[in-house]
Image (cartoon, grey):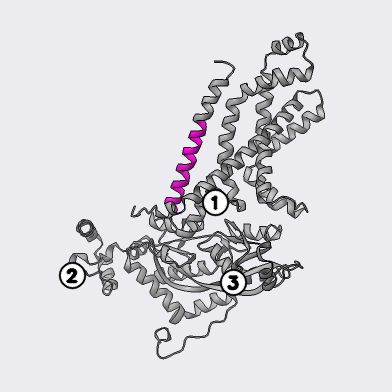
């Protein structure tokens, strides 16, 4: 292949690239937090006896999990204004979409997590006189979080990678910036190579850090 | 570098004998295109030119897109049409006397240079703006259209109707545009304070205008004219245009024979024997009536 690499355009804009990377991480982190809340609420809803509630949660989870994320993003960004909802800017639209998306996956995670808290802990909590909400707050939830920690960190990594789709709605994260460099300089190989390596490095770093956290807090040592 | 190319040339001489006819034909074409560095070996081996390769393959591979009217898009029957497509067909007609012998490789804008460099296509006919940076990586043909930008707004938008309204709004407006070279600078040349949202494709940009995500759509004048024709009464031209830029085809660098040949085809379509083809295309896609080139002294050299 007769191609002469020229990375100078990358170095010249490296601060912009790092900002873009940080933006992606922030978007993923917010979505993980909101998604976790959604997941917890829906996870609990699944454990109630209400058929209506279960049906609603089931519909939500199945709908979100079976529609491509990009279409959800487009729906929130292009579709909502078309039906008269014009309150969210592009960042809010994206974070809402990604949170709702993460929520669906985390619902399943928390459902499994809540189920796998051994019954004997709940019984023990009741035996020492804890009220039901205290049992949940001091016994079940901490255990659940320790059980689902590996799933949470996997989700965070995958959410971070999903932020690349924000480029489609003009959010200047890493993929957008790489494409920007492509458009401006046509250094396509250099731009995508840099973006790929950054995604790889950051995801790997997150994985290493979170694995250590998991090791420290895991239920089974 | 010189050593390397000499070595390749020697090897190639051995293999190229099998096609003596092609070699002879190529030599005739190349007579004026020698890269003479004083040495006979440095002459371009014409049998190795893309021109010969395409002729013996019998079909031309063209890199283009399919989503940008009036340049390259699918008409109601799903057929690929547009100005770029016409240029590709013109090359095919000039090669094989058959404009259907084209294989279109549909690709995104950012694949234009890589697909040439990796030799997936013979030529790019994909509304490619000529820039010095790109010219370091590919060889551009002569341009076949001069584009400029303009600003489109929704016709029912009471706030921003004319360009001056947009200008007065300062940083209170967001202008949508397709991600392209210099796009932000370009917008700011016309609207210095406007916020800019960049999208991957013109249709996403237009959708952002429809959804009210952006207040105005910066696009090529050719596209603006096309959109207003397609959706009468829906959009309005804010009535100001700026920034000339040239659209040309591009070929893989280092093949002067092929480049020169495509140039000849384009030049004669604009000024010579194939003028009627060009005239029809301009009328069809841009609504522009081209005046017949003046007979006598070639005006392009005046």
The residue lying toward the viewer, choosing from B100 and B156, is B156
Horizontal arrangement in the rendering, residue A29 relative to residue B85 (left or right): right
Residue B211: which numbered mark, if any? none
Q: Chain of mark 3?
A: B
The image shows residue B205 at horizontal and vertical percentages of 63, 59
- On the same chain: label 1 and label 2? no
Mark 3 falls on what kind of element? helix
The image shows residue A13 at horizontal and vertical percentages of 47, 53
Residue A215 included in the magenta stretch of the image:
no
Residue A66 visible, this orientation: no
Residue B38: which numbered mark, if any? 2
Horizontal arrangement in the rendering, residue B98 relative to residue B32 (left or right): right
Mark 1 falls on what kind of element? helix
- On the same chain: label 3 and label 1? no
Task: Name the residue: 59% across, 71% down.
Answer: B221
From this view, report whether residue A198 is shown above or below residue B260.
Answer: above
Q: Nearer the viewer, mark 1 or mark 2?
A: 1
Residue B245 visible, this orientation: yes
The range drawn in magenta is A188-207
What residue is disc 1 on? A176
Horizontal arrangement in the rendering, residue A14 relative to residue A157 (left or right): left
Identify the mark nearer the N-term, 3 or 2. 2
Specify few, some or many for label 1: CA neighbours under 10 Å numbering under 14, 14-19, or 20 or more.
Answer: many
The image shows residue B117 at horizontal and vertical percentages of 38, 56
Instruction: State how far apart marks 3 and 1 are (Cα).
Output: 25 Å
Determine contact: label 3, label 2, CB under 8 Å: no
What residue is disc 3 on? B221
For the C terminus of chain A, the image quarter is top right
């Amino acid at each position: 292949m007769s191609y002469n690499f020229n990375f100078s355009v990358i170095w010249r804009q490296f601060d912009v690239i790092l900002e873009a990377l940080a933006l992606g991480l922030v978007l993923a982190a917010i979505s993980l937090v909101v998604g976790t809340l959604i997941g917890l609420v829906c996870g609990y809803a699944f454990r109630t006896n209400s058929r209506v509630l279960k049906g609603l949660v089931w519909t939500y989870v199945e709908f979100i999990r079976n529609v491509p994320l990009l279409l959800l993003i487009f729906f929130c960004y292009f579709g909502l204004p078309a039906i008269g909802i014009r309150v969210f800017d592009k960042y809010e639209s994206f974070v809402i979409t990604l949170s709702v998306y993460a929520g669906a996956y985390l619902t399943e995670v928390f459902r499994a997590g809540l189920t796998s808290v051994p019954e004997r802990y709940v019984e023990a909590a009741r035996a020492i006189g804890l009220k039901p909400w205290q049992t949940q707050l001091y016994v079940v939830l901490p255990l659940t979080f320790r059980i689902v920690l590996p799933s949470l960190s996997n989700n965070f990594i995958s959410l971070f990678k999903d932020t690349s789709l924000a480029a489609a709605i003009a959010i200047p994260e890493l993929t957008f910036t790489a494409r920007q460099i492509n458009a401006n300089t046509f250094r396509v190989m250099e731009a995508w190579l840099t973006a790929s390596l950054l995604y790889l490095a950051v995801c790997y770093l997150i994985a290493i850090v979170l694995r250590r956290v998991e090791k420290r807090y895991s239920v089974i040592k | 570098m010189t050593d390397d190319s000499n070595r390749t040339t020697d090897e190639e001489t051995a293999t190229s004998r099998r096609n003596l006819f092609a070699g002879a034909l190529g030599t005739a074409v190349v007579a004026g295109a020698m890269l003479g560095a004083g040495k006979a070996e440095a002459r371009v081996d014409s049998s190795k030119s893309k021109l010969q390769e395409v002729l013996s393959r019998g079909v031309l591979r063209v890199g283009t897109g399919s989503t940008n009217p009036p340049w390259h898009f699918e008409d109601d029957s799903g057929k690929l049409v547009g100005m770029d497509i016409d240029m590709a067909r013109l090359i095919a007609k000039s090669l094989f006397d058959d404009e259907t012998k084209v294989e279109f490789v549909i690709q995104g804008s950012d694949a234009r240079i890589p697909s040439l460099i990796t030799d997936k296509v013979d030529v790019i006919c994909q509304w490619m703006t000529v820039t010095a940076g790109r010219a370091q990586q590919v060889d551009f043909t002569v341009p076949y259209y001069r584009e400029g930008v303009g600003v489109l707004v929704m016709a029912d938008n009471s706030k921003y109707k004319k360009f001056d309204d947009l200008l007065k709004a300062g940083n209170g407006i967001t202008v949508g545009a397709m991600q392209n070279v210099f796009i932000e600078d370009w917008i700011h040349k016309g609207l210095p304070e406007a916020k800019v949202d960049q999208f991957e494709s013109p249709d996403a940009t237009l959708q952002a205008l429809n959804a009210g995500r952006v207040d105005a759509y910066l696009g090529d004048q050719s596209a603006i004219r096309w959109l207003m024709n397609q959706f009468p009464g829906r959009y309005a031209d804010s009535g100001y245009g700026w920034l000339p830029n040239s659209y040309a085809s591009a070929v893989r660098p280092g093949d002067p024979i092929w480049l020169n040949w495509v140039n000849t085809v384009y030049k004669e379509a604009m000024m010579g024997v194939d003028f009627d083809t060009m005239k029809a295309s301009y009328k069809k896609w841009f609504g522009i009536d081209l005046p017949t080139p003046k007979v006598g002294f070639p005006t392009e050299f005046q």
